[in-house]
């Protein structure tokens, strides 16, 4: 039998031999858990205690009760903290608006309407809502509250990819923001490490002495060693060191991914670059540059932390095409000779 392990649960036998279970979360009051582990009342109480807020008071079989149960489930507990925050944002909205509905009375057309009302204006949020609610109703099937998933057949919105900075755009940014500024350091870190914004904010100054950053990617969990290129090292040494992180706020305190993105947005605007140039596009530009200088797909994958070769093929294929085209042109003489018939 598979045992479900939940965080912060402590149990003991009282003087009558009965097992008592509590949630003891640091900084919060001890909360008693009723019922048998895995039961609806047990999981609802666990979700209430673990989230430090009162659970929605919905009756058995309602969407609100389903959300409460899911947020106390092993599926939710196993998510990374960042994913939990995203899930909670969708689930709390759903419970507020539709918590009174019965789980068995959620037809596919209603599910589609919920996603499309959000996705028509914000496609990315529509996709997130679709993915989270699909997981929620998979949980409903697992707990025998439904036999089908009303969100299963809803297609995802097609999203445009981030623009890959061109060489001209890179030159324009570098001309405006000189070595020694925080804006240039942030730029060099994003471009030179080819890491996502959130992972760049976590880079440690302790790694600078070794000549390589030790990265644990927040999104994938991949553990990487990223060599520090000479031009990046130059930018690091030229920028006043404050705090443990290589890039922080003006006082050296850690920055969130959102704060770094906003800082880059302002810097990009001041440099006169178009709105299509965003922080994440520097990661793509860094990978493009690697490909254009002959890095193999396996080498690019080692830098980027992508899980598969297929995910990096786009960078190498475009670079290979340009390199091969230049090579082909060089084979043709300036003056055309006689036809080779």
Image (spheres, helix red, strand yellow):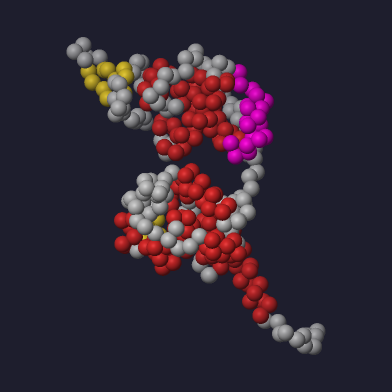
As drawn, the residue found furthest toward the bottom would be 338
The quarter in which the N terminus is drawn is top left
Asked if residue 254 can be seen in this view, the reply is: yes
Does 51 appear above or below 206?
Answer: above
Prevailing SS of the magenta stretch: helix
Q: Which residue is pictured at 65% across the width and 24% down the height?
A: 110
Whether the magenta-drawn stretch holds residue 304 is answered as: no
Residue nearest the observer in this picture, 108 or 170: 170
Residue 87: image location, x then y, percent: 49, 32
Asked if residue 3 can be seen in this view, the reply is: no
Image quadrant assignment for residue 52? top left
Relative to 305, 33 lies left or right:
left
Q: Which residue is pictured at 40% across the width and 32% down the height?
A: 77
Residue nearest the observer in this picture, 136 or 99: 99
Q: Which residues are magenta?
A: 105-125
Q: Which residue is pictured at 44% across the width and 58% down the height?
A: 181
Does 40 appear above or below 329?
Answer: above
Residue 153: image location, x then y, percent: 64, 33
């Amino acid at each position: 039998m598979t045992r479900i392990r939940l965080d912060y649960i402590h149990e003991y036998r009282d003087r009558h031999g009965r097992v008592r279970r509590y949630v003891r979360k640091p900084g919060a009051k001890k909360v008693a858990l009723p019922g048998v582990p895995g039961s609806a009342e047990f999981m609802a109480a666990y979700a209430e205690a673990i989230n430090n807020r009162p659970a929605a008071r919905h009756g058995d079989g309602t969407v609100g009760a389903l959300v409460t149960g899911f947020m106390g489930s092993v599926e939710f507990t196993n998510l990374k903290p960042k994913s939990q925050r995203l899930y909670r944002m969708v689930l709390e909205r759903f419970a507020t608006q539709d918590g009174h509905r019965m789980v068995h009375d959620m037809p596919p057309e209603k599910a589609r309407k919920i996603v499309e009302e959000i996705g028509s204006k914000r496609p990315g949020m529509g996709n997130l809502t679709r993915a989270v609610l699909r997981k929620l109703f998979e949980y409903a099937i697992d707990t025998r509250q439904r036999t089908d998933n009303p969100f299963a057949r809803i297609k995802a919105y097609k999203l445009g990819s981030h623009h890959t900075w061109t060489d001209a755009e890179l030159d324009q940014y570098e001309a405006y923001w000189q070595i020694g500024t925080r804006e240039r350091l942030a730029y060099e870190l994003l471009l030179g490490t080819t890491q996502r914004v959130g992972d760049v904010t976590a880079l440690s100054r302790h790694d600078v002495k070794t000549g390589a950053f030790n990265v644990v990617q927040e999104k994938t969990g991949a553990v990487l060693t990223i060599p520090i290129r000479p031009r990046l090292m130059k930018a690091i040494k030229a920028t006043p060191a404050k705090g443990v992180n290589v890039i922080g706020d003006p006082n050296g305190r850690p920055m969130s991914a959102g704060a770094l993105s906003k800082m880059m947005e302002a810097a990009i605007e001041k440099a006169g670059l178009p709105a299509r140039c965003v922080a994440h596009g520097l990661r793509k530009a860094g990978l493009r540059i690697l490909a254009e200088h002959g890095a193999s797909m396996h080498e690019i994958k080692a830098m980027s932390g992508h899980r598969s070769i297929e995910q990096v093929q786009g960078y190498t294929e475009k670079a290979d095409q340009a390199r091969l085209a230049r090579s082909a042109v060089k084979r043709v003489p300036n003056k055309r000779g006689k036809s080779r018939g």
